């Protein structure tokens, strides 16, 4: 590989790679696929590509890491984040982890197509890991090539940034670099493999440690490495707990409880914006409570708690929208199983799981109250909320546009039919007509109740619009950007990057991106459900 150093004065970043310096590494430096024992990571170099070209980048993420605009626009940046060069101080590696996939233990998984370049400490003292997805094979790639295609890279890049600006805890994305190479993929796992344009996305997060990082060592009865990883994670990513607790058991128990709480808060935010992760395996769950690994994700179009964007999950729908809180709790229980060797009894772990339930219920109820414009949460408010979700499902109503329209309803209602106040939110005219009377009655009940909360219309509208976005990255919108990019036009990707930075403000110039899903997109590939290849 070309390891010529990029000028560090130009890049202006400092590396402090604690994961590789403080945790045991794989003594085998070869690239062969293998079971990696007794190690948290394996050294691995990105595989060079033919012609790296920067397609898009997030300027605020570059600034966060410490990259100036001149460096971002230089050829050196594309070489670096296309996997053809390194900065001084980078120590590339792939992490070892396991996981439960669709409820079943899958054994060793690991970073099969992700390579962490290093940990940057910026001028504010913040730590950011830089990770390339699609930079070539690693010891954990099994039979795969370690590459990523343009469509999946664009989807991850845009979704990471969309989620951040929506206020959802998430990994970030720095850049998408086209590789100039073709990658063969079977998009729907149906025997129709075809070459696609290759690309690499650079992901950025304070930590990429997953639940599965801990599970693998317990499964192998490697308590020594498990202990080192737990204590390392607390020291690096939860330093406030080190200062607060001197007793190992108390500190580890408090850490697990905080992981549970962070996970609960993250899931509440998914539910608020109608996001469905699509593949909530334990190896896709972040230990610091971030949304991680954007594959077959999606946002609700019509409200349907049974919807999953993942074709692989089409039969069992394990990861459907309404099941996400329960799956998160199940995944946390698997993490608790992995941590059991470190505790004399299970009380601290059960306390953490109880903490998840308590935080989720309280935060979920508060979130829904805010979406409906309620200041307080009484029995009447909770009943109105439950009735509404039933109506949204039965009448096939657009989740995002409904709540946005609800916030625009003023203090005085007209006589007669109120459904025109909601605008273009219904997907099925017959269902709309069948539920029109019930919907009208509900709107009048909600309106009378929300007025009792004492806000002015302007106050209520501002509060509701602050939690109910105008724009979410619907699959059909992302697919339009992918189709254009595949044809060589990257302007739609860059336009969407502008739109998603301000998702709570109405942007009339970009209204085409905020519309409900058009009928043509209901079954088109990439516009509704996707495979794990996405």
Image (spheres, rainbow, N blue to C red):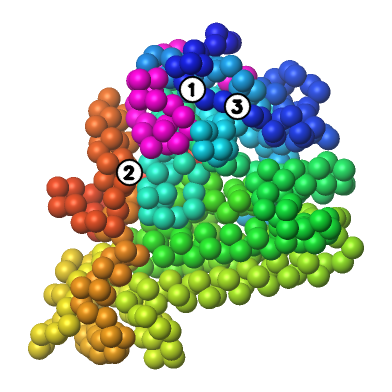
Q: Is residue 223 visible?
A: yes
Which residue bears the numbered disc 1?
12
What residue appears at the point 58 percent right and 54 percent down from the top-left corner?
289
Q: Are marks 2 and 3 in contact (CB under 8 Å)?
A: no
**Real-space Cα separation, disc 2 to disc 3, in angstroms:** 34 Å
What kind of element bears circle 2? helix
Q: Is residue 2 left or right of residue 380?
A: right
What kind of element bears circle 1? loop
Residue stretch in magenta: 45-73
Callout 1 crowding tier (Cα within 10 Å): few <14, some 14–19, many ≥20: some
Q: Please say whether residue 116 is one of the residues in the magenta stretch.
A: no
What residue appears at the point 39 percent right and 91 percent down from the top-left corner?
380
Which residue bears the numbered disc 2?
478
What kind of element bears circle 3? loop
**Residue 335: x and y, percent?**
72, 56
**Residue 385: x and y, percent?**
38, 81
**Real-space Cα separation, disc 1 to disc 3, in angstroms:** 10 Å
């Amino acid at each position: 590989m070309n390891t010529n150093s990029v000028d560090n004065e130009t890049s202006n970043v400092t590396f402090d790679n604690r994961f590789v310096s403080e945790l045991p590494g794989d003594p085998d430096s070869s690239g062969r696929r293998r079971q990696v024992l007794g190690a948290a990571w394996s050294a691995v170099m990105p595989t060079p590509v033919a012609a790296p070209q920067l397609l898009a980048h997030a300027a605020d993420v570059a600034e966060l890491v410490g990259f100036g605009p001149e460096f971002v626009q230089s050829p050196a940046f594309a070489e670096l984040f296309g996997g053809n060069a390194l900065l001084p101080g980078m120590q590339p590696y792939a992490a070892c982890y396991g996981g439960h996939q669709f409820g079943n233990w899958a054994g060793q998984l690991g970073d099969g197509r992700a390579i962490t370049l290093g940990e940057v400490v910026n001028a504010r003292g913040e730590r950011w890991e830089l990770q390339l997805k699609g930079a070539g094979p690693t010891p954990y790639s099994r039979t795969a090539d370690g590459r990523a295609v343009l469509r999946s890279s664009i989807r991850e890049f845009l979704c990471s940034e969309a989620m951040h600006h929506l206020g959802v805890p998430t990994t970030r994305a720095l850049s998408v670099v086209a590789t100039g190479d073709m990658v063969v993929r079977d998009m729907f796992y149906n025997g129709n493999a075809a070459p696609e344009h290759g690309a690499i996305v650079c992901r950025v997060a304070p930590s990429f440690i997953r639940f599965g990082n801990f599970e693998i060592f317990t499964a192998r009865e490697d308590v020594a490495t498990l202990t080192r990883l737990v204590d390392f994670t607390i020291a690096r990513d939860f330093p406030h707990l080190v200062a607060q607790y001197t007793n190992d058991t108390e500190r580890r128990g408090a850490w697990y409880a905080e992981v549970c709480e962070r996970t609960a808060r993250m899931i509440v935010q998914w539910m608020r914006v109608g996001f469905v992760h699509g593949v909530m395996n334990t190896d896709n769950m972040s230990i610091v409570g971030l949304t991680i690994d954007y594959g077959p994700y999606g946002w609700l179009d019509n409200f349907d708690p049974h919807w999953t964007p993942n074709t692989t999950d089409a039969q069992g729908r394990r990861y459907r929208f309404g099941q996400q809180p329960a799956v998160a709790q199940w995944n946390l229980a698997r993490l608790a199983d992995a941590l059991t060797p470190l505790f004399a009894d299970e009380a601290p772990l059960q306390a953490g799981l109880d903490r998840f339930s308590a935080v989720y219920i309280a935060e979920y109820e508060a979130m829904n109250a805010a979406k409906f414009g309620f200041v307080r949460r009484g029995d009447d408010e909770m009943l109105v909320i439950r009735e509404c979700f039933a109506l949204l499902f039965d009448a096939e109503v657009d989740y995002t546009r409904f709540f946005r329209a609800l916030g625009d309803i003023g203090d005085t209602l007209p006589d007669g039919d109120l459904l025109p106040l909601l605008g273009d939110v219904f997907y099925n005219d017959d269902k709309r007509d069948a539920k029109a009377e019930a919907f009208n009655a509900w709107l009048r009940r909600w309106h009378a109740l929300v007025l009792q909360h004492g806000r002015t219309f302007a106050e209520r509208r501002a509060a509701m619009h602050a939690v109910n976005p105008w724009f979410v990255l619907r699959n059909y919108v992302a697919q339009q950007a992918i189709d254009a990019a595949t044809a060589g036009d990257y302007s739609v990707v860059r336009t969407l990057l502008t739109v998603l930075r301000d998702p709570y403000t109405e942007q009339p110039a970009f209204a085409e991106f905020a519309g409900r899903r058009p009928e043509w997109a209901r079954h088109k590939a990439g516009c509704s459900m996707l495979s794990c290849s996405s």
